[in-house]
């Protein structure tokens, strides 16, 4: 399913007098549409230890048990449209919300290694279509990535944009076109016998940069779950090839102990015969993520490894959690580093078993203590 959404029809009319159905325009300023946007989510992803990377076969390898499941708890029901009077409004899309959790519900988990970003989905669905049953109505999911958190300008700095052959070469100074400058939307479709087909969602006027090589570098598989109430799916995005920028420079993962934040979104499409589809997402509620990254969330990649052990077996724990003024570690460490979710170091303490939280804003933080990474919530 491919939808064409007119994001700035009024601007198109000013320039051309009318808008072609296969052309796109981007001119949204976040400040102008702030009241229309959902709050951006951010989540972290840990590096898997050497030799423990999951096998992409649709089965839940042991390493996935050490990773928290993240719910698909938002639903895309509209897209933002610019009106002729310059105002913005929401246009309702032909999607629906689930009747109940058996109709549709799901989670995903993330890991990465030196070569791949792995995504494991567990989906409840009372009608699983693989294009053999009800052809053209197969279930599918998207993984949307860009090698920068908010804008292509974060990579380019003061450099000019590369040549762009589309219909609006001067746009995108603050954000990006998907499928331009390393931002891609990988779309995976369930096929018979646990296989998947895939494509990169295209824009009509986008420069197609090694699409086939990018797709061939990725992996995908799925299987019906043991209860017969849905399916599990697994995908691996090749970071060096699929996420290379427009000049084919490979994406570089964060160094050990460092973090790197990128733009990220994932969606699942539930297609039931005779009914409107469901478009579930992690962050976006607006379908115009197509043109600008205003509606995508963020992924903080952490250069620390996760092991296949239960979280309760970790050598170090912290308490209380949530905390307000001070947090204690279960043993003294040579160095404890407190990170904000954006990846910035907010406090570093040597030879300690406690961290003062004085002056810190309430919210979610990460503690890197020895070989252990802990999530800490600072309460009011």
Image (spheres, grey):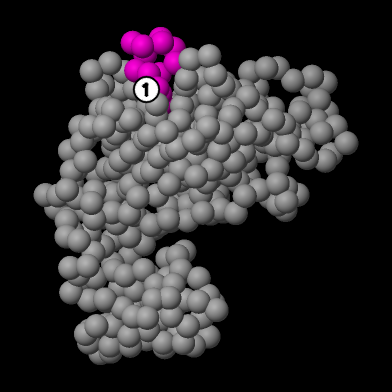
Check if residue 76 falls in the magenta segment: no
Work out whether 341 lies above or below 335: above
Horizontal and vertical percent for residue 43? Answer: 42, 55
Q: Is residue 268 visible?
A: no
Residue at 56% x, 21% y: name it: 276
Horizontal and vertical percent for residue 269? Answer: 47, 28
Residue at 76% x, 28% y: name it: 9
Helix, strand or loop at label 1? It is loop
The magenta region covers 127-140
Residue at 42% x, 33% y: name it: 102
Is 313 on the left or on the right of 10, as rendered?
left
Is 108 on the left or on the right of 56, as rendered?
right
Work out whether 367 lies above or below 248: below
Q: Which residue is mark 1?
A: 128
Check if residue 128 falls in the magenta segment: yes
Residue at 36% x, 11% y: name it: 133
Horizontal and vertical percent for residue 4? Answer: 62, 23
Q: Is residue 23 visible?
A: yes
How many marks the image carries: the answer is 1
Query: Quarter of the image containing the C terminus?
Result: bottom right
Work out whether 47 lies above or below 322: above
Is 240 on the left or on the right of 371, as rendered?
right
Within-10-Å neighbours for mark 1: few <14, some 14–19, many 20+: many
Depth check, front residue: 331 or 341: 331
Work out whether 252 lies above or below 86: below
Horizontal and vertical percent for residue 285? Answer: 59, 41
Where residue 175 sits, quadrant-wise, is: top right
Depth check, front residue: 333 or 135: 135
Where residue 120 sits, quadrant-wise, is: top left
Q: Main secondary structure of the magenta part?
A: loop
């Amino acid at each position: 399913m491919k939808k064409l959404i007119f994001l700035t029809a009024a601007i198109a009319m000013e320039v051309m007098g009318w808008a072609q159905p296969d052309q796109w325009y981007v001119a949204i300023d976040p400040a102008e549409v702030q009241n229309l946007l959902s709050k951006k989510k951010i989540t972290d992803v840990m590096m898997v230890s050497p030799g423990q990377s999951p096998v992409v076969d649709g089965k839940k390898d042991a390493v996935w048990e050490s990773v928290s499941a993240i719910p698909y708890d938002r639903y895309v029901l509209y897209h933002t449209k610019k009106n002729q009077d310059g105002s913005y409004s929401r246009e309702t899309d032909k999607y629906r919300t689930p009747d109940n959790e058996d109709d549709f519900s799901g989670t995903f988990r993330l890991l990465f290694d030196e070569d791949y970003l792995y995504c494991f989905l567990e989906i409840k669905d009372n009608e699983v279509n693989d294009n053999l049953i009800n052809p053209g109505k197969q279930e599918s999911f998207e993984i949307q990535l860009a090698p920068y958190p908010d804008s292509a300008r974060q990579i380019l700095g003061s450099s000019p944009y590369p040549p762009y052959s589309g219909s609006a070469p001067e746009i995108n100074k603050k954000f990006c076109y998907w499928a331009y400058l390393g931002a891609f939307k990988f779309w995976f479709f369930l096929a018979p016998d646990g296989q998947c087909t895939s494509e990169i969602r295209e824009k009509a006027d986008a420069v197609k940069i090694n699409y086939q090589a990018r797709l061939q570098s990725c992996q995908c598989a799925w299987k019906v779950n043991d209860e017969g109430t849905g399916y599990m799916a697994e995908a691996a995005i090749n970071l060096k090839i699929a996420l290379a920028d427009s000049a084919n420079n490979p994406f570089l993962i964060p160094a050990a102990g460092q973090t790197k934040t990128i733009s990220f979104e994932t969606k699942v499409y539930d297609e039931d015969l005779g009914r409107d589809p469901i478009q579930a997402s992690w962050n976006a509620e607006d379908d115009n993520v197509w043109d600008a990254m205003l509606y995508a969330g963020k992924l903080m990649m952490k250069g620390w490894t996760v092991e296949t052990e239960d979280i309760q077996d970790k050598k170090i724990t912290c308490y209380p959690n949530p905390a307000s003024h001070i947090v204690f570690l279960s043993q003294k460490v040579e160095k404890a580093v407190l990170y904000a979710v954006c990846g910035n170091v907010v406090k570093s303490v040597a030879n300690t078993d406690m961290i003062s939280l004085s002056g810190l804003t309430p919210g979610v933080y990460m503690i890197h203590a020895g070989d252990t990474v802990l999530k800490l919530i600072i309460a009011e």
